[in-house]
C-alpha cells in the first residue's frame, strides 16, 4: 500500500514538476515527445530519477553483424568480405575488445549474427560466438532479407521466409552452441514478418527502421515494450503500434528518441561525428529515464557494428568507454539503470503482463 501511495505521489510530483504526460498504456501515446521532454542542449542527469524510487530502465547495447560477402544462400558480395581472413579476424578482434569493455562495466550485449560471418566462423573453427555466449552475452539473429531471400523477398511466402530464417538460425547455433535463439532484428518491410519469425521459433524483436530511408516511425519509439498486432509495409504502422495481448512477438522499442533518423545518424557527416552521436544517446537515455514508470518494464538500447566507433588508435572505442563510465555506470550504481540482454528484457515484460 505504501508502495502504491509512493508511486502515485511520485507520478503527481513528476507531472507537476516536469510537466510530464500522465502515465499512458499505449506505446503510441508514450512515443510522442512533448516540448517538456525534448532534451536540453547539454543534458544533465534528470532530477526525477532520485524521486522515482521504483522506476528502473533496462539497458543494453546490441551489435549487428552485417552480411558482408556472399551469404549461405548465394546472394551479395562486395569488397568487405568475411571470406577474407584479414577482414574477418580484424572484426573478430574488435568484437572481443568491445564486449570485454562492456563486461568490465558489468554489462552484457545482444550479438546479432548472420551468414557469411557465421558460416566463415564454422568453416574456420573460430569460436567467438561460443566464447561470447559463455561470457553471458545473448546470441541472436540479424536478418537482411535481400541477402538471404533476394530482391523479391516481399513477394515470398511466410514458409519461404521461415525456412531461410531457420537456416540462418541453424548456422548461428552451429557457430555458438546456443540452441535457443529467440531475438532477431531485420526483415522490417515484410508485412508477414511476425508470422515468419514465430514459425522460425523467434519471439523477441526490435531495431525497426526502414532500410530504404534509414528512418524509424515515431510510433515505434518510447520505453515500454508491447506485442504488435501485426507487421508493416513501411507506410502503415497501425497494426505494428497496436498492442495485441495474444501476439506471439514482444517488440522492444529503443527508447525515448525524438528524431526519426536516430538509427542512422551516427553515419551522417551532418550529425557531427561520434562525440555528437553519443551526446545524443546520452540525451535520449536521460529522456528515457524521465519516461520510465515504476511498475512497468522500461527499456533503452542502441546498436553498434563490429569496428564501429573505433576512433583514435591510441584509445580504441574511447567514445564507448567514456559513455559507459560517465553516463551509464553512475545510473547503474544508483539503481536507475540495470543491464539486461534484449531477450531478458522481453522475459521481464512477459512476467509483468
Ligand atoms: Zn543490418
Image: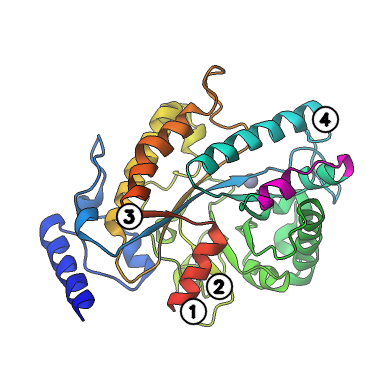
Q: Which of the two marks, 2 or 3, is nearer to us in this view?
A: 3
* Closer to us: 145 or 153: 145
Q: Tell us which disc is closer to us: 3 or 4.
A: 3
Name the residue rendered at 79%, 61% in the picture: 164
> Which numbered marker is on residue 336?
3
Q: What is the spatial separation of the Cα atoms under label 3 and label 4, in whole angstroms? A: 43 Å
- Residue annotated with mark 1: 244
Q: Position of residue 200 (x, y in %)?
A: 73, 69
Q: Residue at x 23, y 48 (%)?
A: 46
Q: CA distance from mark 2 to mark 1?
A: 9 Å
Tell me whether the residue at label 3 lies in contact with that at label 1, contact meaning CB atoms closer than 8 angstroms. Answer: no
Callout 2: 10 Å neighbours few (<14), some, many (20+)? many
Q: Callout 4: few (<14), some (14-19), or many (20+) C-alpha neighbours within 10 Å?
A: few
**Gap between marks 3 and 1 measured at Cα:** 29 Å
Tell me which segment is drawn in magenta. 123-134
Q: Which label's residue is closer to the chain start, 1 or 4?
A: 4
Q: Residues within 10 Å of mark 3 (few under 14, many from 20)?
A: many
Q: Are marks 2 and 1 in contact (CB under 8 Å)?
A: yes
- 346 up-or-down from 147: above or below: below
Quadrant where the N terminus sits is bottom left
Would you say residue 22 is visible in this rendering? yes
Residue ID at (40%, 65%): 224
Secondary structure of the residue carrying tag 2 is loop
Looking at the image, do the residues carrying marks 3 and 4 touch, with CB atoms under 8 Å apart?
A: no
Q: CA distance from mark 1 to mark 4?
A: 45 Å
Q: In what quadrant of the picture does the C terminus appear?
A: bottom left
Query: What is the distance, in whole Å, between disc 2 and disc 3 at their CAs?
Result: 32 Å
Left or right, residue 228 beside residue 149: left
Element under disc 1: loop
Question: Looking at the rendered structure, which numbered label has been put on residue 230?
Answer: 2
Amino acid at each position: 500500500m505504501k508502495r502504491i501511495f509512493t508511486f502515485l505521489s511520485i507520478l503527481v510530483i513528476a507531472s507537476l514538476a516536469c510537466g510530464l504526460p500522465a502515465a499512458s498504456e499505449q506505446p503510441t501515446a508514450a512515443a510522442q515527445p512533448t516540448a517538456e521532454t525534448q532534451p536540453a542542449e547539454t543534458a544533465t542527469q534528470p532530477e526525477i530519477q532520485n524521486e522515482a524510487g521504483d522506476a528502473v530502465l533496462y539497458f543494453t547495447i546490441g551489435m549487428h553483424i552485417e552480411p558482408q560477402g556472399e551469404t549461405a544462400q548465394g546472394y551479395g558480395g562486395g569488397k568487405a568480405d568475411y571470406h577474407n581472413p584479414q577482414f574477418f579476424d580484424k572484426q573478430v578482434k574488435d568484437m572481443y575488445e568491445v564486449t570485454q569493455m562492456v563486461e568490465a562495466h558489468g554489462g552484457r550485449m545482444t550479438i546479432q549474427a548472420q551468414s557469411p560471418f557465421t558460416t566463415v566462423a564454422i568453416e574456420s573453427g573460430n569460436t567467438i560466438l561460443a566464447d561470447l555466449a559463455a561470457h553471458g552475452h545473448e546470441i541472436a539473429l540479424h536478418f537482411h532479407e535481400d541477402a538471404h531471400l533476394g530482391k523479391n523477398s516481399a513477394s515470398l511466402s511466410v514458409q519461404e521466409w521461415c525456412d531461410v530464417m531457420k537456416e540462418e538460425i541453424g548456422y548461428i547455433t552451429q557457430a555458438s552452441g546456443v540452441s535457443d535463439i529467440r531475438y532477431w532484428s531485420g526483415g522490417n518491410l515484410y508485412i508477414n514478418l511476425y508470422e515468419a519469425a514465430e514459425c522460425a521459433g523467434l519471439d523477441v524483436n526490435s531495431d525497426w527502421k526502414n532500410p530504404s530511408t534509414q528512418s524509424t516511425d515515431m510510433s515505434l519509439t518510447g520505453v515500454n515494450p508491447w506485442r504488435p498486432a501485426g507487421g508493416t509495409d513501411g507506410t502503415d504502422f497501425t497494426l505494428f503500434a497496436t498492442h495485441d495481448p495474444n501476439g506471439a512477438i514482444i517488440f522492444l522499442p529503443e527508447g525515448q528518441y525524438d528524431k526519426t533518423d536516430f538509427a542512422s545518424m551516427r553515419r551522417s557527416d551532418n550529425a557531427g561525428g561520434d562525440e555528437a552521436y553519443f551526446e545524443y544517446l546520452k540525451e535520449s537515455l536521460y529522456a528515457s529515464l524521465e519516461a520510465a514508470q515504476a511498475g512497468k518494464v522500461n527499456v533503452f538500447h542502441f546498436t553498434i557494428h563490429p569496428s564501429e566507433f573505433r576512433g583514435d588508435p591510441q584509445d580504441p572505442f574511447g567514445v564507448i568507454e567514456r559513455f559507459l563510465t560517465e553516463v551509464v555506470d553512475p545510473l547503474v550504481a544508483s539503481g536507475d539503470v540495470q543491464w539486461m540482454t534484449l531477450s531478458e528484457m522481453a522475459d521481464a515484460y512477459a512476467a509483468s503482463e
